[in-house]
Amino acid sequence: MSVIPCEQNSDLRAQIERFAEVLKTEAHRLGDHGLDERDFYNSGLFRGAVERVRGQFSATMRTKREFVQHVLNHMEDEGFIAGWDLTDDSSRNDYRVRLPSGRTAVIDLKGCLDGNNTNIFERPADADEFVIWSICTNLGADPRRNAWSGIHTRLSVEMISRNQRVDGLIVWDMVCGTIGRPCPKVAGDDGARLTDIGPFRVPPACTYLAQSAPSCDFGQVGERFGNVAFGIDDGNHRRGQFAPS
């Protein structure tokens, strides 16, 4: 059994690799830099530009925050949560969610699970439930390998070594169900299980709960993340471990 049901689009991956080779050999023809081919590649201009673009893509959280906030607003409108707020430490992209039961859930927003940022989290003392939400928009990455690596070599290690309890893990973002990352949960579907949330159209979320989670009953999870809101059913939840083998 794989960690997550979605898989990388092999055709897109091949196209990315071919385009990368073209870019490496033809980049000197782009732009008005005034350098011949040899000077261009010796100058560091190409490498510096690639690193700058890579850093900009890795560092930006704006679109990711917009996605999460659209989701939380949708859940509040549908009555699945009572409300939500940014935490005081907004630079960590954390959200405090008020549940209908009166409990408080804190969400720590992450990028790809195999990135260094996965190691950096601290469960708030006043959190009734603590959830890590991975938003990995790198379509060139293998989502299954990414999730497996992040859970086994980063998240689980931190939970054990620092005795950090994580009640839930969400692996879900705005590229799920697109041509770059097909979702088997909506394969051959007429769109009935897709949900329009602001500018996004998304398939059901992948949610994982530890056996000790305060709300690990599937019925409660359905209410929390919304059978109606997101088309989630029991087949999209896994309980008892974050990384099924």
Image: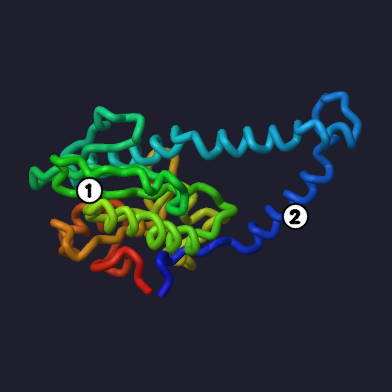
Q: Amino acid at mark 2?
A: Arg
The label shown at residue 79 is: none
Q: Residue at x 48, y 66 (%)?
A: 187
30 versus 215 height, above or below: above
Q: Is residue 94 left or right of residue 136?
A: left
Q: Which residue is mark 1?
A: 130
Neighbours of disc 2 within 10 Å: few (<14), some (14-19), many (20+) = few
Q: Disc 1 and disc 2: Cα gap in Å? A: 41 Å
Residue 190 makes an appearance in the image: no
Q: Residue at x 35, y 43 (%)?
A: 120
Q: Position of residue 122 (x, y in %)?
A: 26, 43
Foreground: 75 or 68? 68
Quarter the C terminus occupies: bottom left
Q: Which residue is mark 2?
A: 18
Q: How many marks?
A: 2
> In which quadrant of the rendered view does residue 62 lie?
top left
Foreground: 129 or 219? 129
Quarter the N terminus occupies: bottom left
Q: Residue at x 85, y 35 (%)?
A: 29
Q: Is residue 128 left or right of residue 94?
A: left
Q: Earlier in the sequence, mark 1 or mark 2?
A: 2
Q: Amino acid at mark 1?
A: Phe
Element marked by disc 1: strand
Q: Is residue 180 left or right of residue 213?
A: right
